[in-house]
Amino acid sequence: MNRPRLIFFVGIALGLVACANPERSRTLNDPSVAPKAMAMQVCSACHGVTGNSISPNFPHLAGQTPEYLVSQLTNFRKHSRSDPAGFEYMWGLSRHLTDEQVKGLAAYFSAQKRVATRVVTSRDQVAAGEAIFKSGVPDKNIPGCFACHGDHGQGNGQTPRLAGQHADYLQKQLMVFQRTDERPEGAIMKVIAHDLTENNMKDVAEYLQSLASN
Amino acid sequence: MRSANQKLAMFRWSACRAFAIAVAMLALGAVQNAAALPAFARQTDQNCVSCHAGGQFPELTPYGRLFKLTGYTIGERAVPFSLMGVWSYAKVADTSKSDSPATDFQKHATPIFATGSLFVAGKITDNIGVFSQTTYDNYASQSTNTDGLPSGDFKGHSQADNMDLRIADRFIDANGDLIIGASLNNNPSVSDVWNSAAAWMQYVPVPSPSSHQFIDGTTPFPGFGSGGNIAGLNLYAYWNQAVYAEIGTYRTANRAFSLFSAGIADADKTKLRGSGNPYWRFTLTHEWGPHNVMVGTSGMVAHIYDAGSDTSDPDNLGKIRNSGIDGQYQYLLDPHTITVQVAYMRQKQDYSANTMAAAAPPYFLADGVTEVPAPRSSDTTNVLRAKISYIYHAKYGGSLGLFNRTGTSNTLNQTSGYDSNGQITSGDPLDTGITSTRVNGNLTGNPATRGWTTEAFWIPLQYIRVGAQFTAYSKFNGATGNYDGFGRNAKDNNSLFLYLWAAY
């Protein structure tokens, strides 16, 4: 390569480096990167730009309560939430977030609107799930979910919104609560989920997924 | 000169040493799970399954594809080095139909440490990142004895492998998503993010000893005729995670780009004419629920000088045109990973004027009188490959692959045939000056090769894979039976391949 051409390419490279914009940074250990930039450039890859994820591997974050989002990001950061869905993806991404960035991310996603998606569900399953959500499983002394998660599954503070969440994600998290100690912050759910059958979990998860956005 | 017993003892020692190292690595890994992650994983501190479908590197997940397309820049700068090693064992169905099994099937049924790679990989700036692999081949060459026969003493050698330096930016908001970037790389399609691309569909490196010459990695793949270790600059754009377009052009990897062909002797480097050797790639993608699908097309036109020839002579220049279509489907929902890939590549090769001037196949038809037809000045090949794989819990997996290459017959490509006495010999006892090649020979001048591969693998730790492959052939070098003229059949090349692949 002759010198002018080399200078040309180096010049282009330096120019592009100089054009790097912190508003489009994907750096995760820089306190100066704005939470919204992180949400756009990194979080969106799995959770969607507006917190409405496509794959059920990743939970919807749109409309989630900010307190719950702060608590989860904090738990990922300090490795106290250790279920596979959490540590495989989130331990690393959250490891050097500042408290301000955590709050900013929570504020961004909680302000987004959950967009209803069309899913195929069984009416019988949804009806059975609705019964569990509203009345629990009385013969096993399992209370209805609405008592803590709200009449419409909208969540309340540290208690997460469940409405419209991926059924697969909800079911797997119920299994995590029931069978492991990987989410100590949700210890109360271990007690509640203790006697749920797999069908109970599927039913209530399908019902919650079917709830319209609100 | 070593005795046969000494050689055997050395082989056994090498085998023991290779497996001792492998076991030591496994043991080391077992106690250092959290820390033992390759460079990109250190950069993001994420598990391998984040970016690799079911943990089966190198196949990427949707997130892994975005990680690459945004220039390997997600995360934070970390120690940018990783090591990878491959230990292997290969066994060919029939080693008897050979003049020299020790030569045709080196290290047959012998465990070896095959290759090791050093990666320099990771985020450099907010917009720039690199993936660079240099590979040490423990069996790169072999010395010969005074009688000209291989000594059995192999020598290792390192050279540039896949390299990709890229710069990217992403413009995204609730209304749209546009990733743009440029990749400076040394292998057409190494910049690609789908596993049906030529550079990535072959997913286990091929060790050099000739006992490995029929394993899956050596079967027909829908690749580009130019091969690698050349220098290309590609520009790409990915719009709304739905439409991807990439264009680029390649040139010889010399002068400022010598790093891309480091370790390769000048005479062995691929020499291209100028910088006008275009490459293109276009795909449509869609993701719904746990499913994602891609359909795409790619192609390249390469003006290539004959190997080791004088590049100032235009009569040494040939041309290869590739055009292909491919597709990929993934189902990713823990604990299941299902992937399907299909790729088809058509290649038209025009031979150089000097190749044709020198082309005079020495062979005769079976009558020993009639010369074989004159060579054709161009050839066309079509390669179809399909693979389906399933992985459970990112630990246990299996796959089934099919390959089929067809093409034009050309006496230029004959490496076996009849001499003027109507005989086929490799030793030329009648001094006709006409010899044929056993095992690798091609009696028909046709490239048709067809077969299948099945594999089972285990990922005990996220950076270690242990696999067993079996590859079976129903056609090889244009024929089902007697493809080399010495009675060797396609099925004689059926191969068992075991490997342990680890990265740190």
Image (tube, coloured by chain):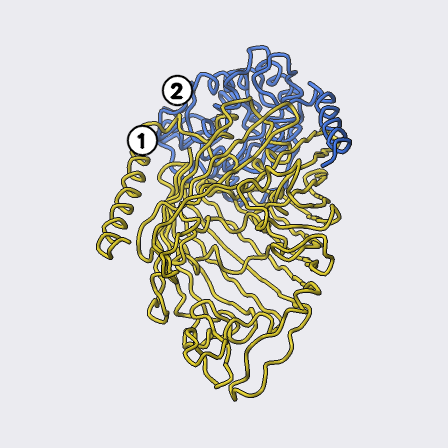
Chain colours: A blue, B yellow
Q: Nearer the viewer, residue A98 or A8?
A: A8
Three-letter residue code for mark 2? Pro
Q: Is residue B410 left or right of residue B40?
A: right
Q: Quadrant of the N terminus of chain B?
A: bottom left
Image vertical order of residue B42 relative to residue B209, above or below: above
What residue is pinned by disc 2?
Answer: A184
Q: Is residue B129 left or right of residue A96?
A: right
Q: Is residue B149 left or right of residue B15?
A: right
- The x, y position of residue A142, in whole percent, is 39, 27
Front of the two marks 2 and 1: 1
Q: Nearer the viewer, residue B307 or B473?
A: B307
- The x, y position of residue A212, in whole percent, is 63, 33
Q: Which mark is residue B171?
A: none
Is residue B173 in view from this perspective? no
Q: Residue furthest front?
A: B146
> Which chain hosts label 2?
A
> Which chain hosts label 1?
B
Q: Nearer the viewer, residue B251 or B494?
A: B251
Circle 1 sits in a helix, a strand or a loop, which is it?
Answer: helix
- The x, y position of residue B328, in whole percent, is 59, 51
- The x, y position of residue B185, in whole percent, is 63, 40
Q: Residues within 10 Å of mark 2 (few under 14, many from 20)?
A: some
Image vertical order of residue B437 relative to residue B284, above or below: below
Cα separation between marks 2 and 1: 31 Å
Q: Residues within 10 Å of mark 1 (few under 14, many from 20)?
A: few
Circle 2 sits in a helix, a strand or a loop, which is it?
Answer: helix
Three-letter residue code for mark 1? Leu
What residue is pinned by disc 1?
Answer: B28
Q: Quadrant of the C terminus of chain B?
A: top left
Q: Can you tell which quarter of the image residue B36 is in?
A: top left
Q: Residue placed at 56% from the left, 17% from the top?
A: A29
